[in-house]
Amino acid sequence: KDKCEDDKRLNQALCRIKQKIVVLSGKGGVGKSTVAANLAAGLALEGKKVGLLDVDVHGPSIPRLLKLTGIQPGLEGDMMLPVEWNWNLKVMSLGFLLPDSDEAVIWRGPVKGGVIKQFLENVAWGDLDYLVVDCPPGTGDEPLSVMQLLGEKAQALIVTSPQAVAVDDVRRSVTFCHRLGNPILGVVENLSGFVCPDCGSVHNIFSSGGGEALAKDMGVAFLGRIPIDPAVASSGDAGEAFLAVKGQSPSALAFKDIVAEA
Ligand code: ADP
């Protein structure tokens, strides 16, 4: 009986969310959180109601990327109130709840799954057009819990960098989604070429196009390339969603294309 009551609560929360996008990557450091934050911010700036959930229990970076570190979510009864980035974007991250960001979290899979479930059903997300979920890299406990809890309609957005090794990991992410029966919104190739600040042209430092070739090979949509742009890194460090600050650079335009595809 308890389980049914529980699931009812989860389902009620999920029914109020129109579209769920789970951001995955095979490897760390490819810009997954950056893409998740900019996708969420970009949708919110377009007037959509957006939730951004960071389930990376070992390295929650969303609070930092959106300049929300140190903020405590409010409580209303037994519900947590997500932190508002602007009135359209509500954010929840384990980073808000950890007393000290230097603290290592040592949790086994089922505990992580329980926490993620609470983030979905005990957070007052309200009615959302989009819930964007930033997962830790790989195909471990957190992405598995997220997909299972959100159900088969949740779409995956897979972020890769152009290097061949990272691209191999993408195959695993694609297979993971296929096995679970979740649709794939598409693949994004981040860190793809460098925009020279002097001449403005894009130099391909690593071989470029691996993400696109792989997407084609696996029958998945390719959502575009985002170049390496020092402004993306510095705006992330400064806690500004990149889209909000730089309107027309090649990287901002690439982010906007991704937002348009979502
Ligand atoms: P992940 O979530 O995959 O571990 P992050 O989003 O935290 O990766 O990004 C890792 C680092 O790379 C961050 O410092 C971020 O600012 C930087 N970064 C991400 N994408 C770009 C880009 N297109 N150009 C420059 N720096 C980037």
Image (cartoon, rainbow, N blue to C red):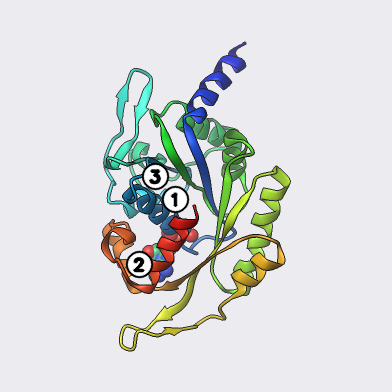
Asked which quadrant contains residue 226, the reply is: bottom left
Could you say where residue 192 lies in the image, as x and y percent from the top left? 49, 74
Near mark 2 (Cα within 10 A), the count class, few <14, some 14-19 or many ≥20, is many
Could you say where residue 124 lies in the image, as x and y percent from the top left? 38, 28
The residue that appears at 71% across and 62% down in the rendered structure is 218
Mark 3 to mark 2: distance in Å?
27 Å
Amino acid type indicated by mark 1: Gly
Amino acid type indicated by mark 3: Glu
Counting residues from the start of the chain, the first of labels 1 and 2 encountered is 1
For label 3, the SS is: loop
The residue that appears at 41% across and 58% down in the rendered structure is 34
Residue linked to disc 1 = 59
Q: Which image quarter has ligand 1?
A: bottom left
Q: Is residue 34 visible?
A: yes
Residue linked to disc 3 = 103
Near mark 3 (Cα within 10 A), the count class, few <14, some 14-19 or many ≥20, is few
Asked which quadrant contains residue 111, the reply is: top right
